[in-house]
Image: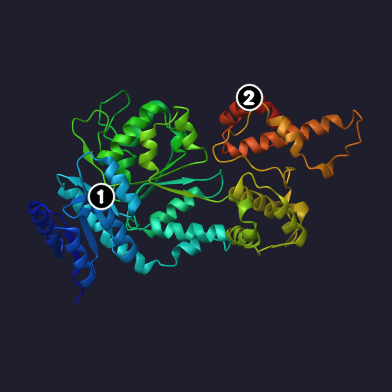
Amino acid sequence: MAETRSALVIDDERDIRELLVMTLGRMGLRCDTASSVSEARSQLSRNRYDLCLTDMRLPDGSGLELIAEISQKHPDTPVAMITAFGNVEAAVEALKAGAFDFVAKPVELTVLRDLVRHALELNESRRSTADTVASRLYGESPAMAKLRQTIGKVARSQAPVYIAGESGVGKELVARTIHAEGGRASGPFVPVNCGAIPAELMESEFFGHKKGSFTGAHADKPGLFQAADGGTLFLDEVAELPLPMQVKLLRAIQEKSIRPVGAQAEVVVDVRILSATHKDLAALVADGRFRQDLYYRINVIELRVPPLRERLDDLPGLASKVLERLASAQGRAIPRLGDDALEALRAYAFPGNVRELENILERALALAEGELLNASDLRLPRLSTQAPAPATGAPTATAAAPAAAAASVDPRTMNPRDTSTSALPSYIEEIERAAIQQALQENRYNKTRTAAALGITFRALRYKLKKLGID
């Protein structure tokens, strides 16, 4: 016989307690109640619960201190906060204190049932996928060990998570891991690149539209929020959202409901928000290019993904795993990296991080003739091994990029005493090639953005790509 699930309801209003107990009871949960912090502590000392619901204000203390206490002493018990309607600040504080989720008064039963369902699924997920995160994010370095530990914690929550990191570090993989390790693993994971949606179509893409709401709307269409209902919506490159859309997104997150374009009524949605960007959101807020209220709402928990240069000890094993995957997909023997190839990889700055490593190894695998990959097979761009990569949020490239690239050309390929004019054209080409390749990587190979970042026209960039043989 299956064990009966249990919940602890903590609220000083009897009507609220009775409503919650009745609703949870119909879902098959045995409920205990408490009307104060002291009563709750007493119940928690005697019983183990699958879920706790607590009010914000209690006669002898705050629900926030109770949440922090439960998170520390009973980490396997999800706890959710009951807040006054519209009190977003309290909800955010609860999530930061360790709350699993929150529900606003007056309690909407549909939202409450979804919350309870996710809490119970979270407990099942913990039991069955304890080691999954280690298999998804490879690395034994201290930076990766810390990242996995943090992911394990944030996966237990429903709090919005902001994933910061340079281009190519694997921010979407981190988001997928958080989803897979949490209570929403059985629901959909919907990734969206905010920079890839035209501004005029954003509202329709995010919230859906009704038939006839605008020219071309020939049928009802659900939006991304509805597609992610019951699961996770991952907003990649969230910094690219225009300000008008930021306002609409903020409201959808706060109210947990959306209004499709052309619709008269709102639709309740149950979505966890994860977001990411390689830019510095705090700097964009300071410049007035990103709304401060939205920033605080999506950045309840910040998770930084380390660049590859900060975990070079992981490089040999990571490269081996990538080669194994690529070779298996092609049905060929798994090649081995020679000592000189590993040395070259360790000396390389990897501005494109893990994504660039995968591209380098895929190219080497395609062009190499034997099963041993040497340094020459890698065809590494001649970038400096010493120059630090741009910090998160730093401009991707500017008109000064060629000058910076000049300092980053590998000195081993040039003779500083050779001032002959015959060497000048190839020297300039190396500068241009390094600057363009770095700008392409940092702008995720979007040529329009790369041209803008370099301060040249799209046509000029296209000409230079052809001239320099950059594919």
Mark 2 surroundings: few (<14), some (14-19) or many (≥20) residues within 10 A: some
Q: In the displayed structure, does residue 341 sit left or right of residue 62?
A: right
Which residue carries the number 1 mark? 102
| Residue nearest the observer in this picture, 42 or 107 | 42
Q: x%, y% of residue 357?
A: 63, 51
> Spatial distance from mark 1 to mark 2, Cα to Cα?
47 Å
Q: x%, y% of residue 402?
A: 71, 30
Q: In the displayed structure, does residue 73 sit left or right of residue 380?
A: left
Residue 311 quadrant:
bottom right
Above or below for 377 versus 426? below
SS label for mark 2: loop
Nearest to N terminus: mark 1 or mark 2: 1
Which residue carries the number 2 mark? 455
Residue at x 22%, y 30% (from the top left corner): 263
| Residue nearest the observer in this picture, 225 or 298 | 298
Q: x%, y% of residue 253?
A: 30, 40
